[in-house]
Image: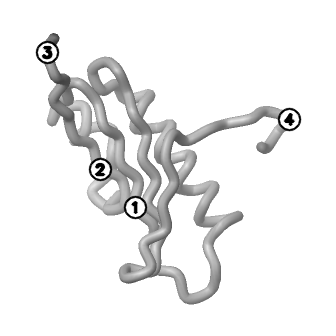
Amino acid sequence: MFDGRHFYIDLVFYNYLLKCFVLIDLKVGDLTHQDLGQVQMYVHYFEEEMMNEGDNPLIGIVLCVDKSDSIVKYTLSKNETQVFASKYVKKRK
């Protein structure tokens, strides 16, 4: 919580072998630039408030139904090596 507002990431893991947090945000639709910005905010928050001395840089992942490589390319800078987007396959009924 900051600025009086609550924000929630879907899944938070700590990988003891890599010594880093792994943040996963699940989306039920196509990837948007807002989704990537949201995960960037979570990454920056965890860097400032949750990481301990000796932790490696954390990883942020957005899982969505479909992703556009162009949206990823133009939303994330070349220096943004901690945020990734990938699509998942929904099982059809």
Residue visible at 37% across and 60% down? 82
Q: Is residue 16 above or below residue 74?
A: below
- Indicate the secondary structure of the residue bearing disc 3: loop
Of 50 and 89, which appears nearest the observer? Answer: 89
Which-is-in-front pick, marks 3 and 4? 3
Disc 1 to disc 4, C-alpha distance = 26 Å
Residue position marked by numbered label 4 in the rendering:
4
Count the marks. 4
Under mark 1, the amino acid is Ile
Q: Which mark is residue 92?
A: 3
- Which residue has dot 2 on it? 84
Q: Quadrant of the N terminus?
A: top right
- Above or below, 54 relative to 40: below
The secondary element bearing badge 2 is classed as: strand
In the rendered structure, which disc, 2 or 3, sits on the residue that comes first in sequence?
A: 2
Where residue 18 appears, as percent x and y from the top left, is 37, 79
Amino acid tagged 2 = Phe
**Label 3, residues with CA under 10 Å away: few <14, some 14-19, many ≥20:** few
Assess whether mark 2 and mark 1 are in contact (beta carbons under 8 angstroms).
Answer: yes
Choose mark 1 or mark 3, whichever is in front. 3
Amino acid type, callout 4: Gly
Of labels 2 and 4, earlier in sequence is 4
User: Quadrant location of the C terminus?
Assistant: top left
Q: Which residue is mark 1?
A: 59
Spatial CA distance of label 2 from label 4 is 28 Å
Name which residue lies at 79% across and 43% down: 2
